[in-house]
Image: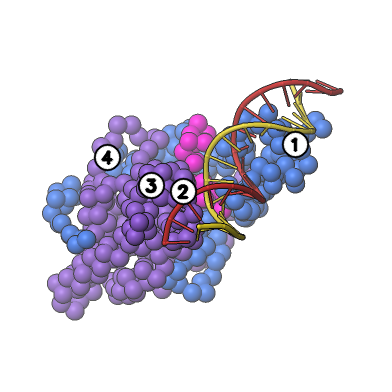
Chain colours: A blue, B purple, C yellow, D red
DNA sequence: GTCTATACTGAGATAGAC
DNA sequence: GTCTATCTCAGTATAGAC
């Protein structure tokens, strides 16, 4: 078959999205795709590289939509700093858009972010997008040092991954579980988080709570 | 040996903390502990259950310290709602305290949180602590519905896990990497996040950014 | 260049002897 | 309680057919 590679990619994407990376073996994939095990390694090299190609194929359009949304927001701001919430919307709404079409993929993305795979897998695809968003945020948040902002963005990804792949809130029961709602709540959460005054360095040594072993 | 179980626990804790759950095989553990492979399954049932016992053993004192710190904060508040930042300190400082003594364990905790293992493993150990912290937060944040607060706490854990186990910030170079600093920054970040006004439900349908496939 | 068949190593788990 | 032997299943590597 000339489309062996495509069939592997499509099947892998579906299975990874449905059940997660670790839970899906290459043998599951090849069985459903109707190809040989070694073909996977021939075309992709390894299971992790296969995951990488699955992700990269989807992440490109998302990041382009993010950049387009940021362009639009900056045009509307007409030279003034773009409100943080507006920047966050530009960043998160394309995710929601993709998630609506393939909800499982959003879960996979969340899982990959939380497991730290994304940074390694898609660094080159994220960089151009981040190189626009980080300065935009920096402009809108002049009170933050670059370092402080960097950490906040880092923390942000943790919260984003929860919004994307989270399912069980052990302390809540029977909560409505619409991804759109979650993203809205996330944007409110992050807007406040970025707007917070920077950490006081002096506070570090101030308090020492000891855990008695 | 009568201390086979202890030796397995101690060795597993060290290796899991140093290299992560997935990266450590039972065969690594038994080799270093000098016990038989089947002994692990006899005493713990499975690798995951072993991880559970390792975590539970450490998490108890941390949560007790958290509760004690919250008690102290409430005493100081003398009946008034405790400031959110104070509650966050009560929650996060014991983590820092443990992390200072065993930095690798903090990383393991962060990893487990981000992978969603913690909720399942330590639900019963977290519940009593959360049943104090959630109402305390609710009192200090009357503008938030219980649901909104629940999601914010959920998002919080995502950010916490990044602070605990994060290492590489792909868009920053040469950042100082002290865990105490990270926690301080995290507290500032979360203080703002919790204080943010609640998400407007109406906003959900307002904006539709399409990703052109 | 593509793909198949098969083998290799290491993982977690288990049955049963002692 | 402990240990040997073995099972199934994973990801990976390679030789060779087309």
Dot 3 corresponds to which residue? B34
Instruction: Give x and y (percent) for residue B40.
Output: 45, 55
Dot 4 corresponds to which residue? B177
Which picture quadrant has residue A56? Answer: top right
Cα–Cα gap, marks 1 and 4: 46 Å
Label 4 near label 1: C-beta < 8 Å?
no
Dot 1 corresponds to which residue? A36
Which picture quadrant has residue B168? Answer: top left
Discs 2 and 4 lie in a common subunit? yes
Label 3 near label 1: C-beta < 8 Å?
no
Dot 2 corresponds to which residue? B26
Mark 4 surroundings within 10 Å by alpha-carbon count, few (fewer than 14), some (14 through 19), many (20 or more): few
Instruction: Give x and y (percent) for residue B204.
Output: 53, 61
Cα–Cα gap, marks 3 and 4: 36 Å
Cα–Cα gap, marks 3 and 2: 12 Å
Chain of the residue under label 2: B
Of the numbered discs 2 and 4, the one sitting upstream in the chain is 2
Discs 1 and 3 lie in a common subunit? no
Residue at 41%, 73% in the rendered image:
B146
């Amino acid at each position: 078959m000339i489309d062996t590679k495509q069939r592997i990619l499509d099947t892998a994407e579906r299975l990874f999205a449905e059940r997660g990376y670790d839970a899906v073996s290459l043998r599951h994939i090849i069985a459903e795709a109707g190809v040989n095990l070694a073909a996977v390694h021939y075309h992709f090299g390894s299971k992790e590289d296969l995951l990488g190609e699955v992700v990269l194929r989807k992440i490109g359009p998302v990041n382009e939509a993010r950049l387009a949304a940021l362009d639009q927001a900056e045009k509307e701001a007409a030279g003034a700093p773009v409100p943080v919430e507006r920047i966050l919307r530009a960043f998160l709404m394309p995710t929601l858009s993709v998630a609506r079409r393939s909800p499982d993929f959003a879960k996979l993305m969340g899982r990959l972010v939380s497991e730290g795979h994304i940074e390694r897998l898609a660094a080159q695809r994220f960089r151009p997008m981040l190189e626009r968003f980080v300065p935009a945020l920096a402009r809108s948040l002049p009170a933050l040092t670059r370092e402080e902002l960097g950490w906040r963005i880092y923390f942000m990804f943790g919260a984003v991954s929860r919004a994307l792949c989270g399912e069980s809130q052990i302390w809540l029961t029977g909560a409505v579980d619409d991804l759109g709602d979650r993203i809205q709540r996330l944007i409110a959460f992050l807007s406040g988080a970025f707007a917070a005054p920077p950490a006081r360095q002096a506070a570090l040594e101030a308090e020492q709570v000891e855990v008695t072993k």
